[in-house]
Image (cartoon, rainbow, N blue to C red):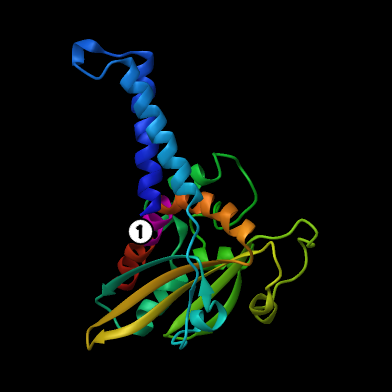
């Protein structure tokens, strides 16, 4: 919802700027002073949406492996899809789907890294290598892998400057991180039999910031990238469905 406010505010800023620079009276648009008002209102909406604090949610009774490792979070997105295939085939497709099969993946990740080249990572993944394999051999680790049920991967998005970047991360170390300055992200894929002929696959991403300052810092990033992130997740599920159905 706040991402919608951010982008609505940006559109208002752009329209207001156009009206200030060129009122376009022939198109019967508002005069220049109303363009200034629209520009200011749009900027205020963007700033307000960026500053709204995120609400922390805590899981009381864990039901998934993701719940075990990330029982609290301030940022979350969930997407699901029913696939006409048995759980074992769907789970195999989750592990084998490549970046090249995910529509818009290359475009959106290029935008995310501002077109800059860089080392292999989930944002710069080879097209023919399973995307989860790329993730876990670069910046992610596998927290859990329950065959035909659930796989959970995680990474550290933000760390304090005094933390050594080369320190190996393990599932137990990830679970115990609690000192200020960290933003931790985890993502799962979970398969559940839907009926005798289909499977429900769900992917959930959670981010937990360990203090208010880091939470505010990440919130600004999250509210900008969320629409693209959601599109990637939906396209990812569609790619899994195509692979599982062949």
Neighbour class for label 1 at 10 Å: few (<14), some, many (≥20)? some
**Residue 16 appearing in the image:** yes
Whether 167 is among the magenta residues is: no
Query: What's the residue at 58%, 70% (across, down)?
Result: 154
Q: Which residue is mark 1?
A: 235
Percent across and percent down for residue 41 are 38, 33
> Relative to the observer, which residue lies in front, 77 or 199?
77
Q: Is residue 129 left or right of residue 86?
A: right
Which residue is at 51% across, 46% downward? Answer: 112
Is residue 97 rendered to the left or right of residue 241? Answer: right
Left or right: 82, with 158 as reference point? left
Secondary structure of residue under mark 1: helix
Magenta span dominant secondary structure: helix
* Image coordinates for residue 243, horizontal then vertical, percent: 34, 68
Q: Position of residue 93 (x, y in %)?
A: 40, 73
* Residue 14 in sight in this render: no
Using the image as rendered, state which of residue 57 and residue 92 is in the foreground: 57
* x then y, percent, for residue 219: 52, 54
Q: Which residues fall within the magenta stretch?
A: 228-233
Q: Residue at x 63, y 46 (%)?
A: 118
């Amino acid at each position: 919802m706040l991402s919608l406010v951010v982008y609505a505010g940006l559109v208002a800023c752009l329209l207001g700027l156009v009206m200030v620079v060129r009122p376009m009276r022939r198109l019967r648009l508002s005069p220049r002073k109303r363009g200034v008002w629209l520009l200011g209102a749009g900027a205020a909406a963007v700033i307000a949406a960026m500053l709204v604090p995120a609400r922390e949610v805590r899981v009381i009774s864990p039901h998934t492996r993701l719940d075990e490792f990330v029982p609290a979070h301030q940022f979350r997105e969930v997407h699901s899809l029913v696939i006409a295939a048995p759980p074992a085939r769907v789970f195999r497709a989750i592990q084998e789907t490549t970046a090249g099969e995910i529509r818009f993946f290359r475009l959106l990740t290029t935008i995310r890294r501002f077109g800059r080249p860089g080392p292999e990572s989930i944002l710069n993944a080879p097209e023919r290598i399973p995307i989860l394999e790329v993730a876990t051999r670069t910046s992610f680790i596998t927290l859990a892998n329950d065959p035909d049920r659930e796989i959970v991967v995680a990474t550290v998005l933000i760390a304090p400057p005094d933390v050594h970047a080369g320190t190996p991360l393990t599932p137990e170390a990830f679970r115990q991180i609690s000192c200020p300055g960290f933003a931790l992200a985890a993502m799962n894929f979970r398969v559940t039999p839907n009926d005798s002929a289909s499977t429900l696959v769900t992917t959930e991403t959670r981010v937990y910031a360990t203090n208010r300052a880091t939470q505010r810092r990440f919130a600004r990033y999250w509210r900008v990238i969320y629409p693209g992130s959601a599109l990637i997740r939906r396209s990812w599920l569609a790619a899994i469905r195509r692979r599982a159905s062949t």
